[in-house]
Amino acid sequence: MPARLPSWAWVSGLTVGAIAAVSVLAVQADQGPHPTAAAVRPGPSVSADAKPTPEETAPARVPDGSGTGRRIVYSLDQKRVWLVDASDAARRTFTVWPGTVDPEPGTYTVGTRTEGATTGSDGVRIEQIVYFALEDGVSVAFSNAVDGSSPPPPASGAKTGGIRLSKADGTAVWEFATAGTKVTVVG
């Protein structure tokens, strides 16, 4: 009868094999193509299904005239949001997909927040909704799709106030935008 290997020998052998396989995959991944950030800002001709650009190497500067102190700054022209801390430093900036109804430039305050999933006016399941304005009878809010997708093109004549964010940016806004947080909208 052959000698039986102890269980620690099997576990050790499997662990060494797994580490070797992961090491080979890591070397292969390091030799492949690497993504680079693009310094591209969406213009007025960007379609509703366009994806926000990756974070820029040098983040876009917080717009002049956007106030001071801890706040969220939303630029209608740049389709961009900044999360600004109390020392006026931008902690995060990213592009967004705006709805069809824009809030007027000015200062607002975060009111209601809804964390759980619901269906947005575009029919997409959304979450982490941060309401801050009411424009032309339409609630304006930051949110992200539950599945992380970009919003579909709005139906002709549809009034949507959702400012859609990527899932990671939606989480960042949710954590930053507690009730009473100032939101400054600039042109």
Image: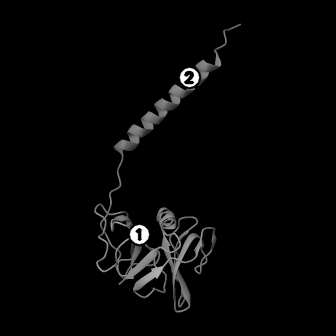
Q: Residue furthest top?
A: 1
Say what amino acid the circle numbered 1 marks: Pro
Disc 1 target residue: 52
Disc sitting over residue 12 in the figure: 2
- In the image, what residue occupies the spot 58% across and 79% down? 122
Looking at the picture, does residue 87 appear above or below residue 67? Answer: above
Q: Which quadrant, please, contains the C terminus? A: bottom left
| Distance (Cα) linking label 2 and label 1 | 46 Å
Residue 64 location, quadrant: bottom left
Q: Residues within 10 Å of mark 1 (few under 14, many from 20)?
A: some
Please say whether residue 155 is visible from this viewpoint.
no
Residue 47 location, quadrant: bottom left
Of callouts 2 and 1, the N-terminal one: 2
Would you say the residues marked 2 and 1 are in contact, meaning their CB atoms lie under 8 Å apart?
A: no
Residue 9 location, quadrant: top right
- In the image, what residue occupies the spot 64% across and 20% down? 7
Disc sitting over residue 67 in the figure: none
- In the image, what residue occupies the spot 48% across and 33% down? 21
In the rendering, at what x and y percent does residue 125 appear? 61, 71
In the rendering, at what x and y percent does residue 121 appear? 59, 81
Q: Secondary structure at mark 1?
A: loop
Looking at the picture, does residue 156 appear above or below residue 117? Answer: below
Q: Residues within 10 Å of mark 2 (few under 14, many from 20)?
A: few
Q: Secondary structure at mark 2?
A: helix
Is 24 left or right of 67, judged from the image as shown? right
Give the number of callouts.
2
Say what amino acid the circle numbered 2 marks: Ser
Is 111 left or right of 2, judged from the image as shown? left
Please say whether residue 183 is visible from this viewpoint.
yes
In the rendering, at what x and y percent does residue 3 appear? 66, 9
Looking at the picture, does residue 95 appear above or below residue 186? Answer: above
